[in-house]
Image: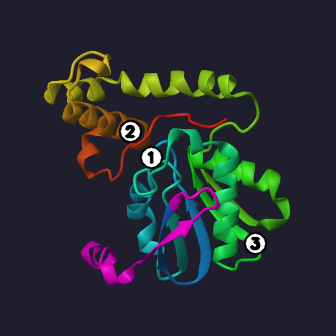
Amino acid sequence: MNMNQWYAPENFEEWILRTEDRVNIFVREVGMGETFIVLHGGWGAEHSYMLDPLLSFQNQVHFVFYDQRGSLRSPCPVSKITLPRHVEDLERLRKELKLERLSLLCHSMGSYLGMQYAKQYPGKVKKLVLISPVPFFGSKSDLTDQLEPVALARWKREEVVQQLAQNNIKGDDLSKLSSKERGIWHRITFSAINLHSVLHWKKMRGCFYHQLALYR
């Protein structure tokens, strides 16, 4: 199966999970076999960047992707974006899928959500797969203090600076960028964190679509 066939619309089942506080969560299913719910990173990204590395396994695994509340296809007010509500969305999804226990595949900040769910619902977790996980223990400020230097170091690599310069993006003040320039900045810096070579940033699906670190 080539890439175009993987992304054929008929291969996906898409639907909306409705929450008690009237937020619509976009859900996309594909594949066959054991069910894994995929928790994307961020906070503020969305699920599409996880498709390329996972769809080659769709003949073995049934993947359930979803955009976390406040992300691209699951818009909601900032006031409704909290960590407890993220956890309850995942529990509601478990019930909707009629799964006794969840197998979770978590990337980056999605690992924090997955581990928080496991802490709150330990009897509802079957498997927990963590890809590039973030630290789970400590305060919000501790987490930020640990992650920010890593992100800044990757953003300051020569190839990242060159890609930004080639797109006429200079400086770190996003308020001085146009909407399009800001979008390019997000795509390049998002790729700088998640790809070995940022030269492939245009091939990277997804980006950040809401404010970062909106959890309490």
Q: On the image, which quarter does residue 34 sit in? A: bottom right
Q: Which residue is mark 1?
A: 45
Q: As displayed, is residue 214 above or below residue 133?
A: above
Q: On the image, which quarter does residue 12 sit in? A: bottom left
Residue contact between numbered discs 3 and 1, judged by CB atoms under 8 Å: no
Which numbered disc, 3 or 1, marks the residue that appears first in the sequence? 1
Which numbered disc, 1 or 2, marks the residue that appears first in the sequence? 1
- Residue 190 in the magenta stretch? The answer is no
Is residue 10 left or right of 39 when viewed as pictured?
Answer: left
Residue contact between numbered discs 1 and 2, judged by CB atoms under 8 Å: yes
Q: Which residue is mark 2?
A: 190
Check disc 2 and report its element: helix, strand or loop: helix
- Which quadrant is the N terminus positioned in? bottom left
Residue 174 or residue 22, whichever sits in front: 22
User: Horizontal and vertical percent for residue 184?
Assistant: 24, 36
Three-letter code for the amino acid on which mark 2 is drawn: Phe
- Which quadrant is the C terminus positioned in? top right
Three-letter code for the amino acid on which mark 3 is drawn: Arg
Residue 29 or residue 131, whichever sits in front: 29
Q: Which residue is mark 3?
A: 101
Is residue 98 left or right of 148 when viewed as pictured?
Answer: right
Residues shaded magenta: 1-24
Q: On the image, which quarter does residue 94 sit in? A: bottom right
